[in-house]
Image (tube, coloured by chain):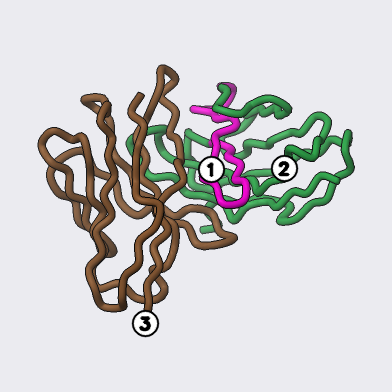
Chain colours: A green, B brown
Amino acid sequence: NAGVTQTPKFQVLKTGQSMTLQCAQDMNHEYMSWYRQDPGMGLRLIHYSVGAGITDQGEVPNGYNVSRSTTEDFPLRLLSAAPSQTSVYFCASSRDRFNYGYTFGSGTRLTVV
Amino acid sequence: LAKTTQPISMDSYEGQEVNITCSHNNIATNDYITWYQQFPSQGPRFIIQGYKTKVTNEVASLFIPADRKSSTLSLPRVSLSDTAVYYCLVPSGSARQLTFGSGTQLTVLP
């Protein structure tokens, strides 16, 4: 059972480049979400999805897009990378948004230069 | 807003019981309280979740008083490997976001 798989683990981008962070889960979870974590801080919610075809914004959505075409996958797109988006990105999934614990991936460490 | 407040840091010694208290004064009637553990360079790991009174699993207990304005995570007989950041979460705001605050850095000393 792989759980939540994030790729890549590390990425360096130049300012203005775009890229997609991949997230896949094999637990048939309806709820998926993306967080970013900056040094010494807690996680901040970027976007979330309560099921295929349904997405919504979190605390810090600007500069990021998401889509949920299947239950398993929830990619995060950076449209035009900025140094302020240098962070560690975590994807999480759960059976439900509030009433079950989240399973997190191992993270993607992104540096924008 | 059901904002949470936790101590920034705590120290303990191996073999002791550790209690971390979180306050959430404006928690909604039907909301659960969830605790996570995070090691450096890893994603958070779910520890325990509860609604009222006491919940216990193989790694921790969660105590929630009747007014539900706070909760206490109890880690029995901690070891060095329990050194981590612990987060308390409740839904907050009109959008009911689950927000990770700064958490509590627990350091277990030999």
Horizontal side of B88 relative to A103 (left or right) equals: left
Amino acid carrying mark 2 in the image: Leu
- Residue mark closest to the camera, 2 vs 3: 3
Identify the residue at horizontal 34%, vertical 76% (top origin).
Answer: B79
Horizontal side of B46 relative to A19 (left or right) equals: left
Amino acid carrying mark 3 in the image: Pro
- Which region is colored magenta? A33-55
The foreground one among A54 and B22 is B22
Instruction: Decide whether residue A23 is among the magenta residues.
Output: no
> Disc 1, disc 3: CB below 8 Å?
no
Amino acid carrying mark 1 in the image: Leu
Q: Identify residue for label 2.
A: A21
Instruction: Decide whether residue A35 is among the magenta residues.
Output: yes
- Residue mark closest to the camera, 1 vs 2: 1
Does label 3 lie on the same chain as label 2?
A: no
- Residue mark closest to the camera, 1 vs 3: 3
Horizontal side of A62 relative to B110 (left or right) equals: right
The picture quadrant where one finds residue A112 is top right
Q: Identify residue for label 1.
A: A43
Does label 3 lie on the same chain as label 1?
A: no
User: Secondary structure beneath disc 3?
Assistant: loop
Q: Identify residue for label 3.
A: B110
Residue that sits furthest to the top in the current view: B94
Q: Chain of mark 2?
A: A
Q: Chain of mark 1?
A: A
User: Secondary structure beneath disc 1?
Assistant: strand
**In the depicted structure, whether residue B22 falls above or below residue B68:** below
Identify the residue at horizontal 45%, vertical 35% (top origin).
Answer: B99
* Sequence-first tag of 1 and 2: 2
**In the depicted structure, whether residue A95 falls above or below residue B47:** above
Residue A33 image position (x, y, % from top left): 55, 36
Magenta stretch: helix, strand or loop mostly: strand
